[in-house]
Image (tube, rainbow, N blue to C red):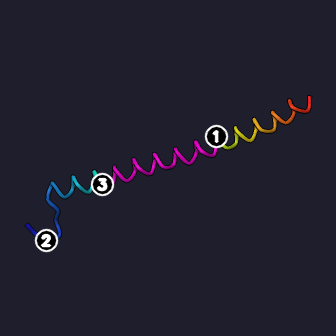
Amino acid sequence: MPGDQFSLDQKTFKKLSLLYILALSAIALSVVVSQILIHQHLDDQESDSTVLNIA
């Protein structure tokens, strides 16, 4: 076998590594987006509570 070709195990490992990194990135992105949405929702509730306290 020439040195520039990968074995089947190496190709599988590279593919799984890429999929693992993509999965972790998707999880991290969803956590960040959910945190932003929760923060916006809490800000809305805070302004609502101010209105209710005044009323």
51 left or right, relative to 26:
right
Tag 3, which secondary structure? helix
Amino acid tagged 3:
Ser
Relative to residue 12, is residue 47 depicted above or below? above
Which quadrant of the view contains residue 51?
top right
Q: Residue at x 48, y 49 (%)?
A: 28
43 left or right, relative to 19:
right
Camera-side residue of 43 and 53: 53
Relative to residue 46, is residue 3 depicted above or below? below
Q: Are marks 2 and 3 in contact (CB under 8 Å)?
A: no
Which quadrant of the view contains residue 11?
bottom left
Camera-side residue of 18 and 3: 18
Residue 3 circle label: 2
Tag 2, which secondary structure? loop
Q: Nearer the viewer, mark 2 or mark 3?
A: 3
Q: Are marks 1 and 3 in contact (CB under 8 Å)?
A: no
Is residue 6 found inside the magenta-colored segment of the image? no
Q: Position of residue 19 (x, y in %)?
A: 34, 50
Q: Nearer the viewer, mark 2 or mark 1?
A: 1
Q: Quadrant of the C terminus?
A: top right
The earlier-in-sequence mark between 2 and 3 is 2
Q: Which residue lies under the disc numbered 1?
A: 38
Is residue 34 found inside the magenta-colored segment of the image? yes
Tag 1, which secondary structure? helix
Amino acid tagged 1:
Ile
Q: Position of residue 23 (x, y in %)?
A: 39, 47
Classed neighbour count for the residue bearing mark 1: other residues with Cα under 10 Å, few (<14), some (14–19), many (≥20):
few
Amino acid tagged 2:
Gly
Stretch of the chain drawn in magenta: 18-36
Q: Which residue lies under the disc numbered 3?
A: 17
